[in-house]
Image (spheres, rainbow, N blue to C red):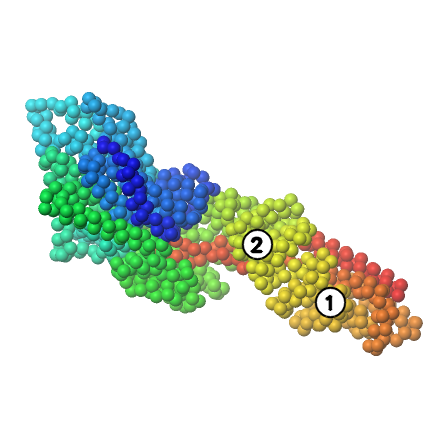
Amino acid sequence: MAVVSWKEICLLTGLVVGCYWNSLFCGFVFDDVSAILDNKDLRPTTPLKNLFLNDFWGTPMSEERSHKSYRPLTVLTFRLNYLFSELSSSSYHLFNVVLHAVVCVLFLHFCRLLLDRSTSLIAALLFAVHPIHTEAVTGVVGRAELLSSIFLLAAFLAYTKSKGADHSIVWSPIISTVFLVAVATLCKEQGITVIGICCIYEVFVAQGFTLPMLIDTLLQVLRGKDVFPYAVLQTLLKLIVLIISTLLLVIVRVQVIQSQLPVFTRFDNPAAVSSTPTRQLTFNYLLPVNAWLLLNPSELCCDWTMGTIPLVESLLDPRNFATLVFYGLLSFLAYHSLWYSHSSAKIVMMALSLIVLPFIPASNLFFPVGFVVAERVLYVPSMGFCVLVAHGFKLLSQRGGLKKMSWLLMGVLLTTHTLKTFNRNWDWESEYTLFTSALKVNRNNAKLWNNVGHALENQNSYERALRYFLQATRVQPDDIGAHMNVGRTYKNLNRSREAEEAYLIAKSLMPQIIPGKKYATRVAPNHLNVYINLANLIRANDSRLEEADQLYRQAISMRPDFKQAYISRGELLLKMNKPSEAKDAYLRALELDHTNADLWYNLAIVNIEMKDPSEALRNFNRALDLNPRHKLALFNSALLMQESGEAKFRPEANRRFLTYVKEEPDDANGYFNLGMLAMDANENEEAEHWMREAIRLQPGFRSALFNLALLYSQSQRELDALPVLEELLRYHPEHVKGLILKGDILMNHRKDTLGAKACFERILNMDPSNVQAKHNLCVVYFEERELQRAERCLVETLAMAPHEEYIRRHLTIVRNKMAAMSAAGQPIVQTEGDSVADKRQEQHQQGKKEEEEGQGVASGTGEGARKEKNLRKSSPTDSVSGQGHGQSKKLDAGQHDKRTNSKSTKEIKDIEKKRAAALKRLEEIERILSSD
């Protein structure tokens, strides 16, 4: 093997970086979303063993919806990326660029086995810049191709060292080859095809056989005229070892997929479900289509499914001519390489083996795959193509008259490919740029229209998204996913009637149940989401809850392992006030997926509805064990701990709220609850900080404003509370407790009885039955020495709340005061001047009286004042089940400003303490009045 110099390595690496540096600015697009963003196997909290139990997308291999793509080592590299940079797309793209550079260097080593120094370098340079590789390099999921190619080339290079100087077998390289083949296969399935490349190399290159020589040798042995030469026996032994290792790998692979092929629909690969001869004609026509992409990569497209390539339905279709030409050229090259023993024949033979063998698993010729054409699967076949081009260039350049022309053409080719690759990378910047660029090439693929719609939908541009979804239904009228996308977009636009019509169209396109045939094998699992989406839509109408439940049950009957149907039905059953049945639904879903943090979270919500907070907390903790950053579980478990009133839970609740605000730094509710915890712990400065932060993020945050005012009031900073209350009442002018607290401060600290009276009267205008406001108004009358009016007011208040002892005691105090004044001959009804004089004469005593009475007034302002955030449910909403992503979205079904009606044990104790304090203050008032 010729040595590869450092200059050549630097040249290749520099060229790769020059072509692909702009890929670092691209995000996660297309399949990256499922493989990276939605794949829980990347998270450190997921056990490593799950990588070997799940497919490439994080779905258990045992499930029917699994794509059966088993690539655990590739997922492991994604996990390493996540460990160092989490979801920073730049690091993932950088890793891919580095891997592509490594492949280029290994490919140069491969070429040196066959070609001279300059020709092999040209082949490697052409491979480095070929535009067909952008999907494999710039698309993060293309890493499977890169890793598999590295170990494929390494396995082949190791095998070339299995022949000793004395023509004996060297076993260590063969063992290394088998190991590297296994590793390549664990990166992507096509890695196993290197065994065939090694076999071809051994027979036709290392041993120098041609097909006629093999046939002649075999005939001689069969006729008994000769025996196998020792070299042939050695070759057979090596081939047997390779073939047995291949069979073992195949057996293991079949066991991994549990002898089941993945479920694909006619939308993924229309020819796969077509009849003879359409299926055969179309699949064979795809071979020249792929060859043309290698030869002329001018029009590249990220998705070639659905109607991209119309079916070849007749022998008279002119496209069959392209198929014949392709097979004719392939046969010519194969004949040339098999019948001749010169070096050119060996080069062509190895080039063909690199083109044909790695492509066979994706060719659709032996078993259907989930795509029509995929540019990334041409990554390894393009190596053989580059060898052929470089070899042809060498032959041309050896002719004197064409040498300069051939070098000029090669320079132009490398330059144009470099520019094309660089510009193509920008198409992968975002999903919108990727799919709009694809539509320039192919406008007959409904999936592309759907995916542009999804990209616009993610930008909340629903009107524009709707136009693309509707176009998808026109391009492919029977596309179930497109109609579902239309329905979901109409729902987002609050056009429920049109949404329901679109869902019903999608439902009508579902295959009908055939007796004795398993339904799940005839439809994509995400298409069953039409029942979920339709049910989610109609259950907004309380009169149609049973109808929605029927749809959920229908989906479950079609697919008993349809986890999302159980989740959605559990949510509905909670709404129907059937918590026991909801619990059963979630438990059934957990049987299907016990590692789903959302399910444990939803079960905790059911426990809360069933008044079982301890079990709810346990299930919240299970959700957090599976996903320590589960935002809803963090928030609501902390809230549950806070509501328990137990001091032992306070540090952990604080830690969870702090984690929550790191995950959701713009959610004011997290800061507010941190403030409430600090208030519980009497850490007033910290409480003030968190409340201020909540108000900064959400101006007019009712509960934060009131509790901050209450905090100031309880900290003897009543005058600081007034501006906060003014802001509260500016946003919420009917906030009763805010008016009561403001009235209390005005009366006791500003000595503004008129302002206090206005607050209490405003409450009574809104709610004449408000006992607290009525009582406080009576106290204002008493403070103003309007004793008769105070008496009438307290009598009315007592009639409203006859069992409140403190009202009766106040009434007694007022009557005693009136009796004492009558006995002393003082007028009970005073003039304005008398009132002022009395206040001046008894200023010190009156101030003390106002303070005490004001404290009594304020004693009720804190009860139930703390805002309690509703426990939010991870309930499913319409699934994004268009052909682009096949993903589902979850609703964050909580609402930030609702209150629960129940009070915690701590709050009840606080209320009792406040009532006792109020009674004590009443005794003080009685003592003061008696002395007066």
Q: Element under label 2?
A: helix
- Work out which quarter of the rendered image holds the N terminus and state it: top left
In the picture of the structure, the residue carrying the numbered disc 1 is 746
The residue depicted at 10 percent of the width and 43 percent of the height is 399
Q: Which of marks 2 and 1 is nearer the N terminus?
A: 2
Foreground pick, 93 / 667: 93
Give x and y (percent) for residue 931. 89, 63
Q: Please tell me how crowded label 1 is: few (under 14), some (14-19), or many (20+) other residues with Cα within 10 Å.
A: many
Give x and y (percent) for residue 23. 35, 50
Q: Please tell me how crowded label 2 is: few (under 14), some (14-19), or many (20+) other residues with Cα within 10 Å.
A: many
Distance from Cα at disc 2 to Cα at disc 1: 32 Å
Foreground pick, 327 / 904: 327
322 relative position to 750: left or right: left
Q: Which amino acid does label 1 sit on?
A: Leu
The residue depicted at 83 percent of the width and 68 percent of the height is 814
In the picture of the structure, the residue carrying the numbered disc 2 is 670
Give x and y (percent) for residue 594. 46, 44
Q: Element under label 1?
A: helix
The residue depicted at 26 percent of the width and 53 percent of the height is 420
Question: Is residue 475 placed above or below 648 in the rendered structure?
Answer: below
Question: Is residue 170 placed above or below 82 in the rendered structure?
Answer: above
